[in-house]
Amino acid sequence: MDLNVNIAGVILKNPVMPASGTYECNSIHDNIFSPDEPGAIVSKTIFINSREGNAPPRICETPCGMLNSIGIPTAGVNNFIRDRLPVLAGFGVPVVISIAGNSLEDFCKLAGIIESTGKADLLELNLSCPNLHHGIEWARDKNELYRVIKRVKEVTNLPVIAKLSPSVTDISEMSLIAESAGADAVALINTYKGMKIDINKRKPFLGNIAGGLSGPAIHPLAVYAVYSSFTKISIPIIGTGGIASWVDAVEMILAGAAAVGIGMYNFVNPLIMREVISGIEAYLKDNNFDSITEITGIAHL
Amino acid sequence: MKIKNNLIKPFLTEGRIKARKNEYTGYLDLLIENDKIAEHAMPGQFVMVRGWNSNDPILSRPFDIVQVDPANGLFRLVIKITGEGTGLLNVLRSGSRLVITGPLGNPVEVPHGEKIVLLVRGVGAAAVVYLAESAKNAGTEVYTFLSASAKNRLVCRDYLKNASKDLNIITDDGSDGYHGDARDILERFINKSKPDRIYTCGSGRFARFADEQDRKGLIKGFVFLESHMACGMGDCHGCAVKKRDSGGYYLVCKDGPVFPVNSVELD
Ligand SMILES: Cc1cc2nc3c(=O)[nH]c(=O)nc-3n(C[C@H](O)[C@H](O)[C@H](O)COP(=O)(O)OP(=O)(O)OC[C@H]3O[C@@H](n4cnc5c(N)ncnc54)[C@H](O)[C@@H]3O)c2cc1C
Ligand SMILES: Cc1cc2nc3c(=O)[nH]c(=O)nc-3n(C[C@H](O)[C@H](O)[C@H](O)COP(=O)(O)O)c2cc1C
Ligand code: FES
């Protein structure tokens, strides 16, 4: 069975990867799951400088999902390159480095620094974090979205994935803008901005007031984001949002995803990525397909 | 202050409920069959548990490992029924299967040949039983103050009694032991018996008391912390607790759950 997928010239041995910020590739997983099993590994988003992250509480359970307002704590790019990147690059699978910045210059600078290490295969621009001061705005404003992707593409030869926000009027238009600015792939979707109120304290539950909704609750929304973008763009889509089983992943691929990202379900079932990989393989076999690419987007009539 | 990350790598495993009892209404005592947890878990560690197949509730629930019996492949949890997840666990019968990730968190160092005080309230008592038993076996004198709103909330009373040289009961309503604020008796006890360490769980007031004693420089204070958790393994950065003095946060699951009381901000 051929599970290989090609994302902007990088071959993944299978179409499954963790979604940024949900799987650290630490040795703590050694008895459970190995980082060399997915088709690619994805770093948590990094910034140039270190960041503390947001005030707790940072997470809150919701029906079939969770809100998070983590706020991307990071040790900053220098520490990341010294301490984490060699680890990530040592698993023999393509490495996606997720970056974000407070300004267009930050994105460009980070792209340059990451490329110069020679250890990253793909760059993911997190243009869609709902927990930053200027996070989601990149993916909400058409001009800014175009500008940031275009500039980053000018300063780096690394293939660029634009991670977009569903908290917009029509994400397929944003996918189209990302493509026209030169993005090599899009990751759809980041979390939906949302909030929870503690009715006893009569205050927002999360320390940062609002957060991002992930999990099975958003899966149908994510499938539609992928489905509606697929016909508008020709670059690959990494379908992310609420995948909790191989069935959810196959749905995403039939909607048009070339690969899938698995986020919060890594917390629920630390074996989910392995189960999704084997489930997709069995599905293809049972339905007499020879390769994963045969089913990408075939739900479109 | 630097905290050592001394993680035993966790397993994703299944456990069968061997026995269950509700000693008091609203509290569940589960004896679970699982060789791996029974063999590897250390005092201070916890497990993430789910006892349902659906995605609602979606997150596994963290609970302290109360006792282990490696020879028989058993370990114990003591659970206060507070909401949806614990409610679902409470209706499971003996023989039911649980999905367990663990052991998680850093073991707490077991004091040898010392004198220690445990100040625990409510289900916070569950966190220190394993430490108390291990310390006792290591020749440490364990003095325990167990507090609750009323007599029928004195969780883990017998377990702590067996492990302690002396168990003092404190209740808010006076239905057992000392009535109300225990500050006086605690201070008197500490001045007289001069323990080496104090451990607290389940009460902000006890934690602040331990902090005050710690500041005097003669006794080391430790606090068992809780926080909302999604992964229990350092992946989600959800379980943050503010560091004292220096900026930033610790992760309760990765850096704790037991902290020197002077290293974290207390509520
Ligand atoms: C390291 C650690 C050890 C713990 N040990 C024990 C123990 O030994 N015995 C025991 O009874 N309880 C313990 N708790 C608390 C226990 O995890 C919660 O009471 C339980 O998760 C509540 O779940 P629920 O679905 O019944 O409540 P709900 O209120 O319906 O839960 C909603 C969400 O909030 C979270 N939550 C609610 N209360 C707490 C809390 N106090 N701490 C952390 N998360 C919470 C739940 O996990 C869930 O994600 C521990 C918590 C932590 C972090
Ligand atoms: C705790 C948590 C942390 C996250 N951190 C990041 C991050 O650092 N960068 C990023 O691009 N997305 C981040 N995300 C979003 C996920 O990568 C993913 O896009 C989103 O959660 C939807 O997928 P899911 O429903 O499978 O979780 C985070 C999500 C969660 C739940
Ligand atoms: S619970 Fe996820 S980092 Fe602690």
Image (cartoon, coloured by chain):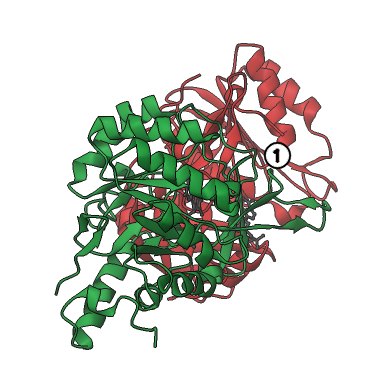
Chain colours: A green, B red
Q: Which residue is mark 1?
A: B203
Query: Between A231 and A290, which is closer to the camera in this rendering?
Result: A231
Q: Is residue A68 left or right of residue B256?
A: right
Q: Secondary structure at mark 1?
A: loop
For the point 31% across and 58% down, the residue is: B35
For the point 55% across and 46% down, the residue is: A144
Residue density around tag 1, few if under 14, some if 14–19, many if 20 or more, within 10 Å: many
**Residue B14 rendering spot, x and y as whole percentages:** 36, 66
Q: Is residue A127 left or right of residue A233?
A: right
Above or below, B72 relative to B256: below
**Residue B50 rendering spot, x and y as whole percentages:** 48, 65
For the point 30% across and 50% down, the residue is: A41
Q: Decide if residue B171 is in sight here.
A: yes
**Residue A224 rendering spot, x and y as whole percentages:** 50, 74
Q: Decide if residue B104 is in sight here.
A: no
Query: Between B232 and A193, which is closer to the camera in this rendering?
Result: A193
**Identity, as a three-letter code, of the amino acid under mark 1:** Ser
Location of residue A199 by image quarter: bottom right
Location of residue B116 by image quarter: top right
Name of the residue lying farthest toward the top? B217
Tell me the chain of label 1.
B
